[in-house]
Image: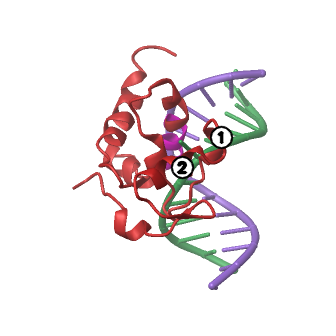
Chain colours: A red, B green, C purple
Amino acid sequence: MSKKEENFFEKVYNVARKIPYGRVTSYGAIAKHLGAAKSARMVGWAMNASHNDDTVPAHRVVNKQGLLTGKHHFDGINLMEQLLENEGVLIKDAKIINFDTIFWNPND
DNA sequence: CCCATGACTGAAG
DNA sequence: TCTTCAGCCATGG
């Protein structure tokens, strides 16, 4: 990876890092915040790369349905759910129950 | 350079 | 309501 390209990741990371404790957001919301609403896939891809950066709470980023689509990218299949539940997030079958309640919009 | 893939999303049938 | 399709664009082979 070239250093310049970090800018794209940094923008994603910067937003992810702003997610409050016990809250979550979606890839699309972050993408929109970056000015690339159609590039939600790139956000997810950036999250995958964020494993290199432990300051990024990737477990707080899920898809728009509140589904933990990226759980298998973590160490264990249950790690993501575990981390979220630890923050008071209710999870059921890889899905956030109170998603609408704890959803956090980066634009706010 | 071309092709396949992906932690997504919204529109269309 | 559910299923399919097409855009999105960076990365790797």
Residue A38 appears in the figure: no
Pinpoint residue A73: horizontal percent, then vertical percent.
63, 39
Please give the range of residues in magenta. Answer: A38-46
Find disc 2 in the rendering and name its residue: A82
Residue A7, quarter of the rendered image: top left
Give the prevailing secondary structure in the magenta stretch: helix
Q: Chain of mark 2?
A: A
Query: CB under 8 Å between callouts 1 and 2?
Result: yes
Residue A56 numbered mark, or none: none
Q: Looking at the image, how many numbered discs can be counted on the residues?
A: 2
> Is A64 located above or below residue A84 in the figure?
below
Does dot 2 land on a helix, a strand or a loop? helix
Question: Would you say residue A98 sits in the magenta stretch?
Answer: no
Pinpoint residue A58: horizontal percent, then vertical percent.
47, 41
Find disc 1 in the rendering and name its residue: A76
- Front residue of this view, candidates A5 and A93: A93
Q: Dot 2, crowdedness within 10 Å: few (<14), some or many (≥20)?
A: some
Q: Amino acid at mark 1?
A: Gly
Pinpoint residue A31: horizontal percent, then vertical percent.
40, 47
Q: Amino acid at mark 2?
A: Gln
Query: Which residue of the protein is positioned furthest toward the top in this rendering?
Result: A2
